[in-house]
Amino acid sequence: MTALFALELSYWQETVLKVVGVLAAVLIPAGAFVQLFLFKMVSHLQSRLGPMEAGPHGSLQAIAEVGKFIQKEDIIPERADRFVFKLAPYVVVMTVLLVYLVIPFGPDMYFANLDAGVFYALAVSSVSVIGVLIAGWASANKYSLMGAIRAAGQLIAYELPLVLAVVGVVIQAGTMNLQGIVAIQAQGEIFGWGAIGNPFILTQFVGLFIFMVAIQAELTQTPFDMPIAESELITGYMTEYSGLRFLLFFIAEFAAVGAFGALAATLWLGGWYLPGLDFDANYMNVVGPIILFAKIMLVAFVVFWVRFTYPRLREDQLQAFAWKFLIPLSLINIVATGVLKVVF
Amino acid sequence: MTVTEHERAFITSTLSESRINLEIESDGMTLNLGPQHPATHGTLRIIVKLDGEQIVACEPTMGYMHRGYEKLCEFRTFPQVTTLVNRIDWLSHFANEVPFILAAEQLMGVEAPPRAQYIRTVFFEMARLGNITLFLGEMGLQLGAMTALFYAFRDREHVLNLLEAVTGGRFHPNFDRIGGLKDDLPKGWIDETKAVMKKIRGFCDQMETLVMGNEIFQTRTRGIGVIPKDVALGYGLSGANARASGVDLDLRRDNPDIAMAWKHADFKVWTHPDGDSFARYWVRLQEVRESTHIIDQLLDGIPAGPIMAKVPRIIKVPAGEAYVQTENPLGWMGYYVVSKGDLGPFRVKIRTASFNNVSVLPWVAKGLYVPDIVTVLASLYFILGDIDR
């Protein structure tokens, strides 16, 4: 990031810059999803207008909602484990922030360029289940507890296909460095034809399908939203939360869509690079984030489209789907990738 | 000794727990679904004893919305009662008025003129449309598909607009009178209604593909909450719930004596052999379609003439007893009216469908999972006001 401005920054200056950058990277997509998808897209899908009053065409509604949540009373149930109850939302938000650390936004636009970036991102993203579990347990509410336990079972079951789907990409790319994966997709060739590079969606489409299904479950979006199933468990582990703490869960939910969307865009859709642009040019540090943002929006659109169309599965049906269909399919995908990697 | 509110709540919850524990001696979790719970869309309380997520026993507790309508009816004159009973099943508004008016007419020995009978039947079926279209979307919502509900609200609006055009009321028309109706149909209403019926049929097609055709919906509903034929009859289920269990009973067809126009329409009574949640959805979907056809046929054959029979200005109902029941959107609804020759009824007993329909819950919910109880509740389709009255 420092290279972008060609400045020599001291350590604390760089840290402040990175903190601001991470917050922007998390909050801008999350706000965009809430405003564009949750408020407007779904309204038009459901043949209604959605919010229209705050700002032109309701465009400031997301900000109004934040204001509303901040004003609300922060209620802690009497029998709740107060410390853990207060801690839980921060744990969930923190894991999402940590995922963004390894996402590359441009040739020099990244917070950390880890060699095991893919591994790190997947490992960190699954820490959120701890936050969810302690939130459900500390609430001292039966619905919360059931929601939390459902969430734990679900997230563990879908962690496996998620990782296995990514393994195909890692095998093909030969690296776990996210920046490296972007570079390989940008400079790849399809049977000697290199005009559009070789985005892994062309070869790893099975992996992308598994990944999309698995993130739908990881993000607890319908059809896999049993942890928060509002017609059964009110809102599951979030039932007792109100005000700012609920807002944190809310932000975490949508920022996580952005984080997984960024992972999917980086691993399958070519990341911050678009064919025809100069890979190493300095202007990509500005254009790259915009391209990546557009790709994230594309992935998130699919996530929300499915969310608002499908009914929800039952918990045991969800587990059966993961263990009997997704995991075998992803194993077959890995074997096929490995064989083809040797052949070509 | 004074008991604080907190202590009283604790005593109540302990009592409810021990009541269940007496029946089955096991340690599990007791979950109170309701009184405020999204799945009960009202204030029904279901005490569920859980083993993990599996239901060991469940007990619906009614009465949180008891409004004493039977008693209130005794303090109203006969024409005033319709305003009250409109609100029993608030989605079938007009259909609630009809059986009471029919009972009163039976006691007085008057019969509404044919035109009034036709219009009554059309409104009755429109109340059914307004009610069941909402169910078709609502069931999707309970299973997590939010969009279906909004489509239901969108298309139900057309029906409500039609009702409003005639009666002035969208929810509580209060249009039925002893001996006929308050007003005639406005000009152009019949053509407009036929256009709306086409829209409703389109809505049915949409629900068939969007909700019923969805694989997840089918896995969630098929084989869930199966009520066999004998159990359905034993618990006194009625309406679509009974027909979904293979009971071929429909008062519209089987009770031609009452002064309604169903006997002039040609329609099919749909039944389904499975008796599961899917069957209940399927039967209701077919019923909405059939209902639109009934309305079309009746509007084609609507006779000219007066809409009000000759009744005295101040209605005094002769002494006697009458019981009339009709096939309401939720099932059979009957009024047992006792008159002593006064301005108002001496006693009114209301038989509502939802009370019996929900009573089957302890039988059907045993062994299901928590998500399934939501499916079963949604597919049994009750209105809280209809349970508690």
Image: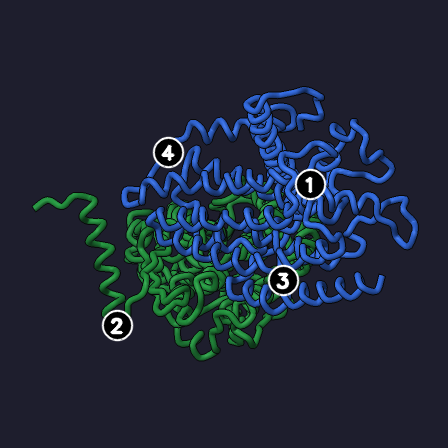
- Same-chain check, marks 2 and 3: yes
Q: Position of residue B111 (x, y in %)?
A: 49, 59
Instruction: Find residue B25 and name its label.
Output: 2
Q: Where is residue A201 in the image (x, y as percent from the top left)?
A: 77, 52
Gap between marks 1 and 3 measured at Cα: 32 Å
Question: What chain letter is assigned to the residue under label 3?
Answer: B
Gap between marks 2 and 1 measured at Cα: 54 Å
Residue at point 56%, 67% (across, down): A320
Q: What element carries label 2?
A: loop
Question: What chain letter is assigned to the residue under label 2?
Answer: B
Front of the two marks 2 and 1: 1
Instruction: Find residue A296 and name its label.
Output: 1
Amino acid type of the residue that numbered disc 4 sits on in the rendered structure: Asp
Q: Which chain is blue?
A: A
- The colour applied to the residues of chain B in this rendering is green
Residue at point 40%, 76% (across, down): B234
The correct choice, above or below, for A256 with respect to A227 in the image is above
Label 3, on which residue?
Answer: B212
Labelled pair 2, 1 in contact (Cβ < 8 Å): no
Pointer 3: residues within 10 angstroms few (<14), some, or many (20+)? Answer: many
Question: What chain letter is assigned to the residue under label 1?
Answer: A
Front of the two marks 2 and 3: 2
Gap between marks 4 and 2 measured at Cα: 40 Å
